[in-house]
Image (cartoon, rainbow, N blue to C red):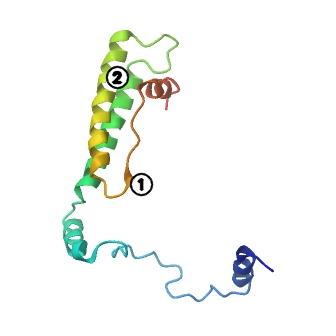
Amino acid sequence: MPNIEEIIQKAMADGAFDHLKGKGQPLSLEINPNADPEWELAFHILKENGFAPAFIEERQAIEQQVSVVRQSLQAAGAGSSQAWQPAVRTEFEAQIAEINKRIRNYNLSVPHEKLARRMLDADSEFARAARGE
């Protein structure tokens, strides 16, 4: 008995998917089938006016802050063979701790755990900067 992959491959070879409605067109992402219908209008109004739900805007702000800290860390001596100076390390560990505090608060606000963001690890960030990433 053929498995599902073989059935799909045979159907594709036979042209079963060649004349589907909307073929070659982008998917419409205007309506979220998983969204609560009571909130659909509110989300639509926010989107049309250039806003996103608060947790999405917070995620974007966190990612921006992470990017700034990583760039600053690289500028402070990434790629050099010498160890990070204690003052530089202390400063960046404090910045990472502040970001992690913000991430903890963000993770409490997301509607689903899959949207949570992983916390930063100072040692991993220093290693990343030393590699030039």
Q: Is residue 104 left or right of residue 14?
A: left
Amino acid carrying mark 1 in the image: Lys
The image shows residue 1, relative to residue 116, as above or below, that is below
User: Residues under labels 2 and 1: Cα distance?
Assistant: 27 Å
Depth order, front residue of 110/5 = 110
> Which label number is shown at residue 26?
none
Depth order, front residue of 49/103 = 103
Q: Residue at x 23, y 72 (%)?
A: 39
From the image, state whether disc 2 or disc 1 is nearer to you: 1
Q: Residues within 10 Å of mark 1 (few under 14, many from 20)?
A: few
Instruction: Determine the secondary structure under disc 2.
Output: helix
Q: Residue at x 78, y 79 (%)?
A: 2
Q: Residue at x 31, y 40 (%)?
A: 103
Q: Which of marks 1 and 2 precedes in the sequence?
A: 2
Depth order, front residue of 35/30 = 35
Q: Which residue is mark 2?
A: 93
| Residue 27 screen position, x and y as percent | 44, 75
| Residue 121 screen position, x and y as percent | 42, 30
The image shows residue 90, relative to residue 25, as above or below, that is above
Amino acid carrying mark 2 in the image: Glu
Instruction: Determine the secondary structure under disc 1.
Output: helix
Quadrant for the N terminus in the image: bottom right
Q: Which residue is mark 1?
A: 114
